[in-house]
Image: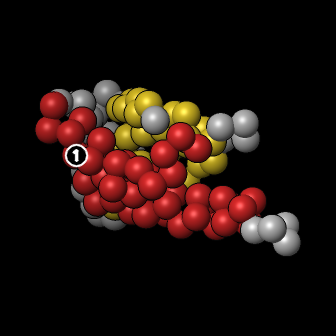
């Protein structure tokens, strides 16, 4: 499973952020193994340089299951790490459901 990380101009993709994202993806999506060809993580600060109330950090997570259409989830949170963790959990549940239906012999 290949992991690609994209950030907007307000978030710096330093080594610590990359490690955090890769760890979260491995924990949540590692069980799907070869069923996923690529995971794209898009991180953005919705408020930009101007800080205001709310949940400004957004993580859009797109997975590419082998021989299937891409699957996308989005999560907003106060920090990048929280947004990544929330999106990873959403994706894990979605893929569990999707692959569970595909693997069910009754269809």
Q: Is residue 106 above or below residue 9?
A: below
Extreme left residue here? 16
- The residue nearer to you, when weighing 102 against 60, is 102
- Determine whether the residue tagged by mark 1 lies in a helix, strand or loop: helix
Locate residue 27, reporting x and y percent.
Answer: 33, 55
Please report the residue visible at 44 percent of the width from the left and 31 percent of the height from the top: 2
Q: Is residue 105 above or below residue 43?
A: below
Locate residue 79, reporting x and y percent.
Answer: 25, 55
Can residue 47 be seen in this snapshot? Answer: no
Can residue 73 be seen in this snapshot? Answer: yes
Which quadrant would residue 87 be assigned to in this image?
Answer: bottom left
Extreme front residue here? 105
Q: How many marks?
A: 1
Mark 1 residue crowding within 10 angstroms, few (<14) / some (14–19) / many (20+): some
Q: Is residue 70 left or right of residue 37?
A: right
Quarter of the C terminus within the rendering:
bottom right
Extreme bottom residue here? 106
Q: How is the image coloured?
A: secondary structure
Please report the residue visible at 21 percent of the width from the left and 39 percent of the height from the top: 19
- The residue nearer to you, when weighing 18 against 74, is 18
- The residue nearer to you, when weighing 81 against 37, is 37
Please report the residue visible at 43 percent of the width from the left and 63 percent of the height from the top: 89
Locate residue 70, reporting x and y percent.
Answer: 66, 41
- The residue nearer to you, when weighing 9 against 89, is 89
Locate residue 32, reporting x and y percent.
Answer: 51, 51
Q: Is residue 43 left or right of residue 1?
A: left
Please report the residue visible at 43 percent of the width from the left and 39 percent of the height from the top: 41
Q: Is residue 14 left or right of residue 46?
A: left
Pointer 1 residue = 20
Which quadrant would residue 35 be assigned to in this image?
Answer: top right
């Amino acid at each position: 499973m290949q992991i690609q990380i994209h950030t907007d101009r307000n978030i710096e993709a330093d080594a610590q952020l990359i490690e955090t994202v890769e760890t979260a993806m491995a924990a949540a999506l590692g069980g799907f193994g070869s069923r996923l060809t690529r995971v794209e993580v898009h991180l953005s600060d919705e408020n930009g340089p101007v800080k205001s109330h709310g949940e400004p950090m957004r993580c859009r997570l797109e997975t590419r299951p082998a021989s299937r259409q891409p699957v996308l989830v989005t999560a907003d949170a106060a920090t990048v790490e929280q947004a990544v963790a929330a999106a990873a959990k959403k994706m894990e549940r979605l893929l569990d459901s999707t692959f569970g239906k595909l693997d069910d012999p009754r269809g």
